[in-house]
Image (spheres, rainbow, N blue to C red):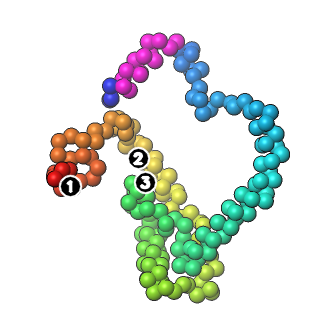
Amino acid sequence: MSFYRALSKQLIKTYVEPAQRAMVVPWYQQPRQLTPLQQWWRENVYPVWFKYVIGPYERYQYEHAVAELRSYGLMFDDQHNSHDPVVERALELLPHDLAVSRYRRMMRAFEMNTKKTHLPVEEQNYDPMIPYLAPFMEEAKFQFQEEQELLKYHPWDRRLYSGPTTGLGEPTEYSTFSCW
Protein backbone atom coordinates (compact mmCIF):
# COMPACT_ATOMS: atom_id res chain seq x y z
CA MET A 1 0.00 0.00 0.00
CA SER A 2 1.36 3.41 -0.87
CA PHE A 3 2.29 5.86 1.81
CA TYR A 4 -0.27 8.49 0.77
CA ARG A 5 -3.11 5.98 0.65
CA ALA A 6 -2.26 4.73 4.15
CA LEU A 7 -1.92 8.29 5.42
CA SER A 8 -5.29 9.36 4.02
CA LYS A 9 -6.99 6.29 5.53
CA GLN A 10 -5.49 7.06 8.93
CA LEU A 11 -6.48 10.72 8.75
CA ILE A 12 -10.04 9.83 7.86
CA LYS A 13 -10.23 7.35 10.75
CA THR A 14 -8.79 9.87 13.18
CA TYR A 15 -10.47 13.15 12.30
CA VAL A 16 -13.79 12.30 10.70
CA GLU A 17 -16.63 11.15 12.92
CA PRO A 18 -18.36 7.90 11.88
CA ALA A 19 -21.65 9.70 11.25
CA GLN A 20 -19.92 12.27 9.04
CA ARG A 21 -18.07 9.55 7.12
CA ALA A 22 -21.39 8.15 5.91
CA MET A 23 -22.55 11.64 4.90
CA VAL A 24 -19.55 12.51 2.73
CA VAL A 25 -20.74 12.84 -0.88
CA PRO A 26 -18.25 13.28 -3.72
CA TRP A 27 -18.44 16.58 -5.57
CA TYR A 28 -19.63 14.95 -8.79
CA GLN A 29 -22.63 13.40 -7.03
CA GLN A 30 -23.80 16.58 -5.35
CA PRO A 31 -26.83 18.29 -6.93
CA ARG A 32 -25.91 21.28 -9.08
CA GLN A 33 -27.66 24.60 -8.67
CA LEU A 34 -28.18 26.24 -12.06
CA THR A 35 -28.15 29.98 -12.54
CA PRO A 36 -31.23 31.53 -14.18
CA LEU A 37 -29.27 31.96 -17.41
CA GLN A 38 -28.23 28.29 -17.40
CA GLN A 39 -31.83 27.27 -16.66
CA TRP A 40 -33.14 29.41 -19.55
CA TRP A 41 -30.46 28.03 -21.88
CA ARG A 42 -31.29 24.45 -20.94
CA GLU A 43 -35.04 24.95 -21.43
CA ASN A 44 -35.14 27.19 -24.54
CA VAL A 45 -31.90 27.15 -26.55
CA TYR A 46 -30.55 23.64 -26.12
CA PRO A 47 -33.60 21.78 -27.54
CA VAL A 48 -33.46 23.88 -30.72
CA TRP A 49 -29.66 23.47 -30.94
CA PHE A 50 -30.03 19.70 -30.56
CA LYS A 51 -32.91 19.43 -33.03
CA TYR A 52 -31.29 21.37 -35.86
CA VAL A 53 -27.53 21.12 -35.31
CA ILE A 54 -26.20 18.40 -33.02
CA GLY A 55 -28.90 15.80 -33.73
CA PRO A 56 -28.52 15.79 -37.53
CA TYR A 57 -24.73 15.88 -37.27
CA GLU A 58 -24.61 12.89 -34.92
CA ARG A 59 -27.11 11.04 -37.11
CA TYR A 60 -24.88 11.68 -40.14
CA GLN A 61 -21.83 10.40 -38.26
CA TYR A 62 -23.71 7.25 -37.19
CA GLU A 63 -24.99 6.52 -40.71
CA HIS A 64 -21.52 7.12 -42.14
CA ALA A 65 -19.96 4.68 -39.63
CA VAL A 66 -22.61 2.06 -40.42
CA ALA A 67 -22.01 2.46 -44.16
CA GLU A 68 -18.24 2.08 -43.71
CA LEU A 69 -18.62 -1.06 -41.61
CA ARG A 70 -21.11 -2.59 -44.03
CA SER A 71 -18.92 -1.85 -47.04
CA TYR A 72 -16.17 -4.04 -45.56
CA GLY A 73 -18.44 -6.57 -43.85
CA LEU A 74 -17.29 -5.69 -40.31
CA MET A 75 -19.12 -5.38 -37.00
CA PHE A 76 -18.60 -2.45 -34.65
CA ASP A 77 -16.93 -4.66 -32.03
CA ASP A 78 -14.33 -5.72 -34.60
CA GLN A 79 -12.81 -2.23 -34.31
CA HIS A 80 -11.74 -2.62 -30.68
CA ASN A 81 -8.00 -2.63 -30.05
CA SER A 82 -7.10 -6.27 -29.51
CA HIS A 83 -4.10 -5.25 -27.37
CA ASP A 84 -6.28 -3.55 -24.75
CA PRO A 85 -6.22 -5.79 -21.65
CA VAL A 86 -10.02 -5.90 -21.28
CA VAL A 87 -10.55 -6.70 -24.96
CA GLU A 88 -7.74 -9.25 -24.87
CA ARG A 89 -9.40 -11.06 -21.96
CA ALA A 90 -12.81 -10.81 -23.65
CA LEU A 91 -11.37 -12.41 -26.79
CA GLU A 92 -10.08 -15.27 -24.64
CA LEU A 93 -13.59 -15.73 -23.25
CA LEU A 94 -15.19 -15.57 -26.70
CA PRO A 95 -16.68 -18.87 -27.95
CA HIS A 96 -14.81 -20.54 -30.80
CA ASP A 97 -17.43 -19.89 -33.49
CA LEU A 98 -17.60 -16.15 -32.67
CA ALA A 99 -13.81 -15.90 -32.58
CA VAL A 100 -13.49 -17.62 -35.96
CA SER A 101 -16.17 -15.42 -37.54
CA ARG A 102 -14.45 -12.31 -36.13
CA TYR A 103 -11.11 -13.40 -37.54
CA ARG A 104 -12.60 -14.15 -40.96
CA ARG A 105 -14.43 -10.82 -41.08
CA MET A 106 -11.22 -8.96 -40.26
CA MET A 107 -9.15 -10.88 -42.81
CA ARG A 108 -11.81 -10.33 -45.50
CA ALA A 109 -11.89 -6.60 -44.67
CA PHE A 110 -8.10 -6.39 -44.80
CA GLU A 111 -8.02 -8.09 -48.18
CA MET A 112 -10.80 -5.88 -49.59
CA ASN A 113 -9.04 -2.79 -48.29
CA THR A 114 -5.76 -3.75 -49.95
CA LYS A 115 -7.57 -4.53 -53.22
CA LYS A 116 -9.60 -1.28 -53.00
CA THR A 117 -12.91 -3.14 -53.27
CA HIS A 118 -16.08 -3.41 -51.19
CA LEU A 119 -18.65 -6.06 -50.40
CA PRO A 120 -21.42 -6.48 -52.95
CA VAL A 121 -24.56 -4.56 -52.01
CA GLU A 122 -26.51 -7.81 -51.65
CA GLU A 123 -24.26 -8.84 -48.74
CA GLN A 124 -24.49 -5.50 -46.91
CA ASN A 125 -27.97 -6.07 -45.46
CA TYR A 126 -27.06 -6.56 -41.79
CA ASP A 127 -26.79 -4.40 -38.69
CA PRO A 128 -23.11 -3.89 -37.78
CA MET A 129 -23.94 -2.24 -34.46
CA ILE A 130 -25.07 -5.43 -32.70
CA PRO A 131 -22.60 -5.83 -29.81
CA TYR A 132 -21.43 -9.43 -29.81
CA LEU A 133 -18.35 -8.70 -27.67
CA ALA A 134 -20.02 -6.56 -24.97
CA PRO A 135 -21.09 -9.33 -22.55
CA PHE A 136 -17.62 -10.85 -22.70
CA MET A 137 -16.03 -7.44 -22.05
CA GLU A 138 -18.23 -7.02 -18.97
CA GLU A 139 -17.20 -10.46 -17.75
CA ALA A 140 -13.54 -9.55 -18.36
CA LYS A 141 -13.97 -6.35 -16.31
CA PHE A 142 -15.47 -8.35 -13.46
CA GLN A 143 -12.60 -10.82 -13.63
CA PHE A 144 -10.02 -8.02 -13.52
CA GLN A 145 -11.80 -6.42 -10.61
CA GLU A 146 -11.94 -9.71 -8.74
CA GLU A 147 -8.25 -10.37 -9.37
CA GLN A 148 -7.31 -6.90 -8.15
CA GLU A 149 -9.38 -7.33 -5.00
CA LEU A 150 -7.91 -10.74 -4.26
CA LEU A 151 -4.35 -9.54 -4.85
CA LYS A 152 -4.97 -6.23 -3.07
CA TYR A 153 -3.61 -4.49 -6.15
CA HIS A 154 -4.21 -0.84 -6.90
CA PRO A 155 -2.75 1.06 -9.85
CA TRP A 156 -1.18 3.69 -7.61
CA ASP A 157 0.81 0.99 -5.79
CA ARG A 158 2.63 0.01 -8.99
CA ARG A 159 6.28 1.04 -9.32
CA LEU A 160 7.04 2.23 -12.83
CA TYR A 161 10.79 2.11 -12.51
CA SER A 162 12.94 -0.26 -10.51
CA GLY A 163 16.34 -1.22 -11.75
CA PRO A 164 16.87 -1.88 -15.45
CA THR A 165 13.18 -2.28 -16.38
CA THR A 166 10.68 0.57 -16.38
CA GLY A 167 7.51 -1.49 -16.05
CA LEU A 168 6.32 -0.26 -19.43
CA GLY A 169 6.55 -3.59 -21.22
CA GLU A 170 10.16 -4.50 -21.84
CA PRO A 171 10.50 -8.24 -22.44
CA THR A 172 13.98 -8.38 -20.91
CA GLU A 173 16.30 -6.16 -18.95
CA TYR A 174 18.10 -3.48 -20.97
CA SER A 175 16.00 -4.23 -24.08
CA THR A 176 15.41 -0.53 -24.73
CA PHE A 177 17.88 2.29 -25.04
CA SER A 178 17.46 4.44 -21.95
CA CYS A 179 20.62 6.46 -22.66
CA TRP A 180 23.30 6.67 -25.36
Q: Are the residues flagged by discs 3 and 1 in contact, CB closer than 8 Å?
A: no
User: Looking at the picture, how far across and down is residue 158, in whole percent?
Assistant: 31, 39
Q: What is the number of the mark on residue 176?
A: 1
Circle 3: residue type? Val
Q: Nearer the N terminus, badge 2 or badge 1?
A: 2
Q: Nearer the viewer, mark 3 or mark 2?
A: 3
- The residue under the point 77% across, 53% down is 49
Q: Which residue is mark 3?
A: 86
Tell me the mark number nearer the camera, choosing from 2 and 1.
1
In the picture, measured across the screen, residue 24 lies left or right of residue 178, that is: right
Tell me the number on the disc at residue 144. 2
* Residue 49 or residue 139, whichever sits in front: 49
Say which amino acid is labelled 1. Answer: Thr
Q: Which residues are magenta?
A: 4-17
The amino acid at mark 2 is Phe
Q: Residue at x 46, y 47 (%)?
A: 142
In which quadrant will I find the N terminus?
top left
Q: Identify the mark nearer the N-term, 3 or 1.
A: 3
Up-down relation of residue 171 to residue 3 (above or below):
below
Residue 166 visible somewhere in the drawing: yes
